[in-house]
Image: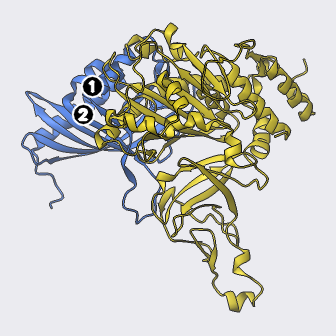
Chain colours: A blue, B yellow
């Protein structure tokens, strides 16, 4: 395996721009716009991390999930945020998704790309001076659709086993 | 102004609280207070039965999880004969933590400091330089891990270091009748679907324990979005119907929400409904036939919720069960553990659907969970206000309500579900423990 991706540099640049714009839509709380970044058949999973010995078969639970969503359930979450009664986001969290170390590789299917990235989420709530930091490794599948792209899979593993946020009312 | 905190006489203050509860009053400051926290650690969590694990978390010999009894980290392990043990996770030699992972499989635990080795049952079997160093003065049988008592009910494993505590059966005191709804979901009962979520929240454990002891009052407001989007097939008015049941003197309480016209047992796996009914008594079948939502707390800090949920408003969907533990780690601060329980005999499709309903609603990113924790964290913060030290909250609902004599479940049972009787019972028991009068 070569150290460098075989994916065309121009396509890589486009995909990097695409995921930066996706992050901007979330951070600007344009959740309807954000849904358009997601494919109809998206799987959106955040597995549970368990503190295990180094030789254990897994550290990310095969069955346990923090998020186990699809387009329909993500729409439910967005519709909820559009009501006046989503107390967890009243006043709203201020988030910033810092996406780095983006690596883009071909998948098994033409027009679909494996996109790995690091994402550090900063979240500030109300008048609190203590932000939440959520460090995440993402393995997305990004699909070419017309002139742009859509996310067909988001898989995001949180590095911390016990999360120091009273809830996760944000998107990863 | 004389505040409660300046009062040096803790016992007198507790008696005042105890008397206030019977008159429908409970002080605000106890929901975020160092002295109360310290007292709870000693007098409550050091004395009562504490939930440790569900047996299905450690199904095979050698399986273990690490959990807490009060501030004591314990290893809950199944030994080679299938028997479950709970031992303090601390080497008897110099006190190092033995096991650093939260789950796994091991026949032995070896201390990484001086190498003492214990069986997963807690028995000391290996001491380096035993003959040369200790010259026969150390008997291995005297230096096993510190053992916790354990007792189980329908898969729930509880522990306590209190040798004088009465049996778990006596401790639950009839609340088993209601727990069976969550635990006997078919011939082989219930099992966990994966490990628990756990996260730290600036919420006092007591707020969560009270809410899950049957707070039907908060639902239409705290979870208003659910009604707004049509996820509850009823208005706030009909949602308040049902019963509040509590076991007097034991602290346990449950709210049984009733929605008129709801099909009995709807949302359970269809292929299992007949079996579930067979595993229950006729009285339980009658009570649970009228139950749409059931939310209860085993005193002090273990709770359950069952409710049907569908992504499509108006449809019954699946019943999911969440079990949660509020592990106190400081005044106004707890570690939340949240599991999803599914019927062991259900299809994989049903289990997956129930788990998805759980993650969307009551896991740490769940839409209902989010709102509860937002409210509870703010309540906890306000409870520490200096101006709140002298104030009390009203626990006046249902002071005069008579028991519903037609109801076939045990305990003090009143309707409507919107009622403080469960909470007076809960805090009465809490005060009894803190006073050492149990």
Give the quadrant of residue B273.
top left
Tell me if I can see residue B294 in this picture: yes
Q: Residue at x 22, y 27 (%)?
A: A37
Q: Position of residue A71 (x, y in %)?
A: 25, 27
Which mark, by number, is residue A19?
2
* Residue A68 location (% of width, % of height): 33, 36
Q: Earlier in the sequence, mark 2 or mark 1?
A: 2
Q: Nearer the viewer, residue A101 or B118?
A: B118
Judging by the rendered image, the residue that carries numbered circle 1 is A72
Within the image, what quadrant is residue A151 found in?
A: top left
**Vertical side of B215 occupied by B75: above or below:** below
Q: Position of residue B390 (x, y in %)?
A: 82, 19
A148 vs B23, nearest the viewer: B23
Residue at image coords 34%, 42%: B346
Q: Nearer the viewer, mark 2 or mark 1?
A: 1
* Residue B81 higher or lower than B24, as above or below: below
Label 2: chain letter: A
Residue B370 visible in the displayed image = no
Q: Quadrant of the N terminus of chain A?
A: bottom left
Residue shown at 75%/90% (left/top)? B135
**Which residue extends farthest front?**
B282
């Amino acid at each position: 395996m070569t150290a460098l991706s075989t994916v065309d540099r121009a396509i890589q640049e486009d995909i990097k721009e695409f995921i930066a714009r996706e992050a901007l839509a979330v951070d600007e709380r344009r959740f309807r716009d954000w849904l358009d970044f997601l494919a109809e058949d998206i799987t959106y999973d955040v597995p549970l991390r368990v503190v295990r010995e180094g030789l254990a078969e897994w550290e990310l639970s095969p069955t346990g999930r923090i998020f186990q969503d699809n387009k329909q359930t993500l729409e439910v979450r967005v519709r909820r945020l559009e009501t006046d009664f989503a107390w967890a986001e009243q006043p709203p969290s201020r988030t910033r998704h810092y996406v780095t170390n983006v690596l883009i590789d071909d998948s098994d299917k033409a027009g679909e790309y494996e996109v790995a990235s690091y994402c550090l989420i900063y979240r500030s709530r109300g008048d609190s001076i203590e932000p939440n930091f959520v460090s995440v490794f993402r393995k997305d599948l990004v699909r070419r659709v017309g002139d742009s792209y859509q996310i067909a899979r988001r898989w995001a593993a949180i590095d911390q086993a016990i999360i120091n946020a009273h809830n996760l009312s944000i998107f990863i | 102004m004389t505040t409660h905190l300046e009062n040096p006489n803790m016992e007198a203050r507790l008696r005042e609280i105890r008397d206030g509860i019977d008159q429908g009053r409970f002080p605000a400051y106890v929901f975020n207070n160092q002295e109360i926290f310290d007292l709870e650690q000693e007098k409550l969590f050091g004395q009562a039965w504490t939930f440790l694990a569900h047996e299905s978390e450690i199904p095979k010999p050698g399986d273990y999880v690490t959990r807490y009894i009060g501030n004591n980290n314990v290893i809950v392990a199944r030994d080679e004969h299938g028997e479950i043990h709970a031992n303090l996770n601390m080497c008897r030699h110099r006190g190092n933590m033995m096991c650093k992972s939260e789950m796994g499989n091991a026949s032995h635990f070896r201390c990484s400091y001086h190498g003492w080795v214990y069986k997963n049952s807690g028995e000391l079997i290996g001491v380096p330089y035993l003959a040369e160093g200790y010259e026969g003065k150390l008997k291995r049988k005297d230096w096993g891990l510190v053992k916790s008592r354990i007792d189980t009910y329908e898969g729930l494993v509880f522990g306590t270091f209190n040798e004088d505590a009465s049996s778990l059966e006596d401790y639950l005191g009839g609340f088993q009748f209601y727990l069976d709804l969550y635990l006997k979901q078919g011939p082989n009962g219930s099992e966990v679907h994966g490990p628990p979520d756990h996260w730290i929240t600036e919420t006092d454990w007591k707020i969560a324990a009270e809410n899950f002891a049957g707070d039907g009052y908060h639902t239409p407001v705290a979870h208003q979005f659910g009604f707004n989007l049509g996820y509850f097939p009823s208005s706030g008015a009909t949602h308040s119907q049902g019963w509040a049941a509590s076991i007097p003197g034991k602290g346990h309480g449950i709210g049984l929400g009733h929605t008129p016209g709801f099909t009995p047992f709807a949302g359970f796996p269809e292929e299992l409904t007949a079996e579930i009914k067979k595993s229950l008594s006729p009285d339980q079948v009658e009570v649970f036939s009228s139950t749409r939502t059931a939310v209860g707390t085993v005193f002090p800090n273990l709770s359950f919720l069952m409710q049907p949920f569908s992504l499509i408003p108006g449809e019954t969907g699946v019943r999911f069960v969440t079990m949660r533990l509020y592990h106190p780690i400081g005044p106004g601060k707890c570690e939340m553990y949240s599991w999803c329980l599914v019927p062991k005999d259900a299809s994989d499709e049903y289990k997956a659907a129930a788990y998805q309903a759980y993650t969307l609603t009551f896991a740490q990113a769940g839409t209902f969970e989010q709102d509860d924790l937002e409210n509870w964290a703010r309540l906890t913060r306000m409870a520490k206000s200096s101006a709140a030290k002298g104030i009390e909250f009203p626990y006046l609902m249902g002071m005069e309500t008579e028991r519903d004599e037609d109801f076939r479940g045990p305990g003090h049972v009143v309707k409507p579900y919107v009622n403080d009787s469960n909470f007076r019972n809960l805090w009465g028991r809490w005060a009894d423990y803190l006073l050492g009068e149990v």
